[in-house]
């Protein structure tokens, strides 16, 4: 009797929708996984959202829906998605649910060059004091990414990158000030994919996050930029499948 494969929940980063993961979603679905992509309410919001609460709620809803079907869940997070995605797992790990007499729950986390924060930290607290020059205010409470071709999509085929650039939306700036209250990577087995050519999150910052004390880390590395799910989707799918317990 084969063991059912876990549900994979994909949490995109700022400015992005779940369609950015389409190549990886296709590969995972073809390998027998149920895949749910999250549309973050903070992306393209009107009016701007003041914090990450609605993002967290959207992710929690997807986790609970799968867990209540007694599914193991792996939450895969990209960039800012690591902030709201980690927060969303609070109280929903397999061990937490088991103690409540329930089956299913979050069995693992995968950080794709994502923010893995300590309690009380926000995304903005991890940035230089003067911020990042490529994050530009546009409209009340919203920000855009300036020069995304180089920041997000170095190493991605131009046709693919151009299509994704057109799909980018404004992001609610308040989400970047939201502080995490739960350190998921200390409680749940986690894989960190370090992207060594990332122009958005320097590799040194990724290495520091992936080796934080108290973490349940396995570290993978690749020679890719900030969007490995577009430049090397087969590699990213393998990392996720490996984290989920497959031998690939």
Image (tube, rainbow, N blue to C red):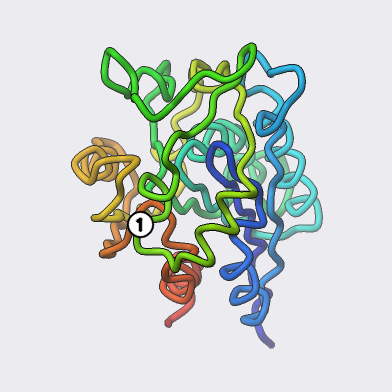
Mark 1, secondary structure of its residue: loop
Q: Position of residue 235 (x, y in %)?
A: 41, 73
Q: Using residue 171 as the reference point, say whether residue 155 is left or right of it.
A: left
At a point 30% along the width and 45% down the height, the residue shown is 199
Where in the figure is residue 154, as x and y percent of width and height? Answer: 35, 57
Q: Indicate the quadrant where residue 193 lies.
A: bottom left
Q: Which residue is mark 1?
A: 154
Query: Is 77 situated left or right of 192 in this image?
Result: right
Instruction: Tell me residue 122's x, y (percent).
Output: 43, 20
Residue at coordinates 64% horizontally, 59% vertically from top-left?
Answer: 72
Q: Does the image show residue 163?
A: yes
Within 10 Å of disc 1 (Cα), the crowding (few <14, some 14-19, many 20+) is: many
Query: Which quarter of the picture shows residue 34?
Result: bottom right
Q: Position of residue 155 (x, y in %)?
A: 35, 63
Q: Is residue 17 left or right of residue 210?
A: right
Q: In which quadrant of the rendered image does the N terminus lie? A: bottom right
Q: Residue furthest bottom?
A: 1
* Quarter of the image with the C terminus in it: bottom left
Camera-side residue of 34 and 167: 167
- In this rendering, is residue 194 above or below 146? below
């Amino acid at each position: 009797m084969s063991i059912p494969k876990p549900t994979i929940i994909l949490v995109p980063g700022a400015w992005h929708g779940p369609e950015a993961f389409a190549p990886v979603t296709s590969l995972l679905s073809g390998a027998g996984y149920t895949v749910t992509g999250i549309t973050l309410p903070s992306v393209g919001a009107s009016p701007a959202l003041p914090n990450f609460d609605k993002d967290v709620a959207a992710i929690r809803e997807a986790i609970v829906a799968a867990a209540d079907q007694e599914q193991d869940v792996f939450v895969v997070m990209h960039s800012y998605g690591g902030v709201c995605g980690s927060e969303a797992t609070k109280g929903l790990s397999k061990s937490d649910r088991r103690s409540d007499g329930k089956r299913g729950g979050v069995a693992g986390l995968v950080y794709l060059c994502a923010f893995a924060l300590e309690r009380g930290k926000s995304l903005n607290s991890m940035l230089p004091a003067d911020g990042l020059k490529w994050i530009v205010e546009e409209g009340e409470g919203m920000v855009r990414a300036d020069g995304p071709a180089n920041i997000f999509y170095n190493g991605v085929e131009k046709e693919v990158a151009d299509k994704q650039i057109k799909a980018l939306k404004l992001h609610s700036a308040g989400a970047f000030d939201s502080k995490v209250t739960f350190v998921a990577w200390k409680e749940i087995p986690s894989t960190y994919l370090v992207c060594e050519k990332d122009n958005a999150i320097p590799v040194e910052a990724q290495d520091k996050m992936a080796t934080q004390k108290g973490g349940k880390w396995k570290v993978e590395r690749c020679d890719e930029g900030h969007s490995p799910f577009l430049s090397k989707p087969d590699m990213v799918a393998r990392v996720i499948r490996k984290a989920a317990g497959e031998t690939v």
